[in-house]
Structures are given as C-alpha cells and as structure tokens.
Image (cartoon, helix red, strand yellow):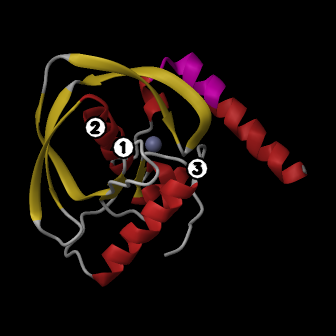
Amino acid sequence: MAIKTILTEPNKALRQISKPVIQVGKSEQKLMDDMLETMYAANGIGLAAIQIGIPKRIIVMDLSKDENKKEPRYFVNPVIKNKNEINSTYEEGCLSVPDQFAEIDRPKECEVEYLDYNGKKSFLKAEGLLATCIQHEMDHLEGILFIDYLSKLKKSMIIKKLSKNKLRRIVV
Ligand code: ZN
C-alpha cells in the first residue's frame, strides 16, 4: 500500500467525470488499498479515486469511530437507485477543500447499487451520515465539490482562500 497525494481545489483534474470500471481486478484492488491508506493518513472518512488523480468510479469510506475497529467500505461504479425526498443537513468538509466547512442539504436516505472489493454486485440502503457521505463521494465522480452548492460569493471566497494558501505553501 502507498499513501498518495490528495489533489486540492482549485485543480481542473477534480472537475473530470470519472469513467466506469470494466472489471474489478488486481490493479483496482491495489488502487482501493492505496486510497484507503491515503484516506486514513489524512483523517478522512471518504475518498474518491479522482481525489488522487485517477478518474475511475471508485470510492472508499470508513465511518467507524473506533481506531482499533476499522470498517472499510468499497464502492465501485456506484449508482443511486432511490433517494428520500426528505433532506438532512450536515456540516461537510472535504480532503480536496482543506479546512473549509459548510452546511449542505442532501436526501436523508438513499439506495445504492455497486460492486464491492471483489467485484460482487451489492446493494446498500443508507441513511444519515452514511447516506450523506456516499452522496458527497459520488459527486466527486461527476466532478462536483460540496462548495458548488454554496452561493457564488461564498464559493469564490473559499477558492480564493485556498489559492492563497497554495501560494503561501510554495513561498515557504
Ligand atoms: Zn470530498
């Protein structure tokens, strides 16, 4: 396994639409292992492949709170089959939008069809944080970031701040 660099906004690569995986083979499993390790190292709860620059429809997540009891989840080619009309609100952040948070409304429940780590067709009914996290990660597959749901002004302020931080990092 290897820790990869997480791309941060503004970065055009994050705006790509990821391509479906044709078959879950050894290289996809290695990618999922790397993604998980990268996510853990960054203290994230979800990561899409495009966040490490690979435009494949793959997501990893782990919502477990216990450090010693990891519960990794893998979603390949996830598709939302059903969404609840009722929304819930969470304060969201993103490893690709460092140190920025905002309240985002999303359907409270959703049903997802996907392939698991072994390429087996699977189905999950998610609610609460799990549902929000899946939808956030699936947005990445379409090149969408959570800041896209904010007002133009708020979004441009965040992007400006992030660009400045990047610049500062280079100068130091
Ligand atoms: Zn994200």
Mark 3 and mark 2 in contact (Cβ < 8 Å)? no
Kind of residue at badge 3: Asn
- Give whichever of 120, 71 is nearer the camera: 71
Gap between marks 1 and 2 measured at Cα: 7 Å
Mark 1 and mark 3 in contact (Cβ < 8 Å)? no
- Toward the right, the furthest residue is 172
- Residue occupied by mark 2: 130
Q: Secondary structure at mark 3?
A: loop
Provide residue 132's location: percent of width, then percent of height: 31, 33
Disc 2 crowd rating (10 Å Cα; few below 14, some 14-19, many 20+) is some
What residue range appears in magenta? 150-158
Provide residue 4's location: percent of width, then percent of height: 56, 66
- Mark 3 or mark 1, whichever is nearer to me: 1
Residue at horizontal 76%, vertical 40%?
165
- In the picture, the disc for residue 11 is 3
- Give whichever of 158, 17 is nearer the camera: 158
Which numbered disc flags the more N-terminal residue, 2 or 3?
3
Above-or-below relation of 131 to 31 = above
